[in-house]
Amino acid sequence: MEEIGKALKSIFDKLSDFFDIFDLSFFVSGVATVLCIFIWIDIRGIEVEYSYDGSLRIILIALICYIAGLITFAAGRWIRMGFGGWLMSKFGKKLNRHDSFDENFIRVIKGHGLESSPLFKKYLDRTEVRGIWRLYVKLWAEIRRDEKYSNSLSFLKRYWVMAATYDGLVSTFIITLLLSIESWVGVVADPSIDNHLLGSFIVVIQFAIFLACLREANRYVKYQVEEVVATIADGAE
């Protein structure tokens, strides 16, 4: 039974590695983006001819959704870091995205009383090569390497997936917002007062969701930092 258990664990690990390559978090924003564009095409009355049928069409749509997910994730992360930094400079401390991460990371390290630990200190002292970031990467490597951290690694992967999902949705809701505005200005919608009021409401709601996605992505990144440091602190006790 023990041998069977090990064999099954090996199979599940390989399946997990396979799905890690095709990160399913990208499909969330990818499917949402493609669906949004298809709905807009239908509203606009644009005729689209499909030359592929059956299973080939399904494969192509899945591939398009995955590529759209990769693009929206990359754009969303860039927007979050850039737009988030701009908001911070306007309404808070004037820090770039590196300084903001470093400040939060150091605060978490001090919260666990690890700033004087030999491993942490030798990295924190390397300010000329941004040792703080290298320490964060080192801690991730340590958690991946040591089997005793396997539960925390699964938890961290979940945080990463959620952050990536919200980053992708940031771009998705920007696209949705732009398409809604395009319809709202009268290109599609009947330019009556009621329709304009409805359009205004939809645009405001979508902008609010966009801001919520930004906030949640930032929150999960901070959770990753907290979990990484807490995991190493618990292992050092």
Image (tube, grey):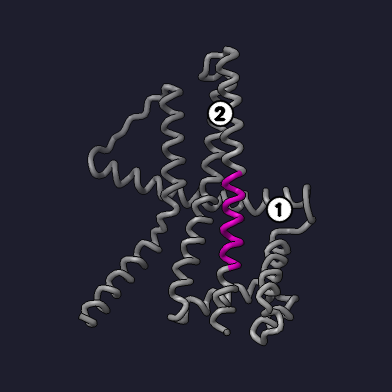
Q: Is residue 9 found left or right of 66 in the rendered image?
A: left
Q: Say which of 115 and 12 sits in front.
A: 115
- Most frequent secondary structure within the magenta stretch: helix
Q: Position of residue 139 (x, y in %)?
A: 57, 76
Q: List the residue tagged with mark 1.
A: 85
Q: Are marks 2 and 1 in contact (CB under 8 Å)?
A: no
Residue at 69 percent of width and 59 percent of height: 97
Q: Is residue 208 above or below residue 49?
A: below
Residue type, mark 2 in image? Ile
Q: CA distance from mark 2 to mark 1?
A: 27 Å
Q: Is residue 47 found left or right of 203 in the rendered image?
A: left
Is residue 222 covered in magenta? yes
Q: Quadrant of the N terminus?
A: bottom left
Q: Quadrant of residue 135?
A: bottom right
Magenta-colored span: 212-226
Residue at 47 percent of width and 52 percent of height: 70
**Neighbour class for label 2 at 10 Å: few (<14), some, many (≥20)?**
some
Q: Say which of 101 and 174 sits in front.
A: 101
Residue at 55 percent of width and 44 percent of height: 171
Q: In the displayed image of the protein, which residue is found farthest to the top?
A: 192
Q: Quadrant of the C terminus?
A: bottom right
Judged from the image, the secondary structure of the residue bearing numbered disc 1 is helix
Judged from the image, the secondary structure of the residue bearing numbered disc 2 is helix
Q: How many marks?
A: 2
Q: Position of residue 175 (x, y in %)?
A: 54, 37
Of mark 2 and mark 1, the one earlier in the sequence is 1
Q: List the residue tagged with mark 2.
A: 202
Q: Position of residue 232 (x, y in %)?
A: 56, 78
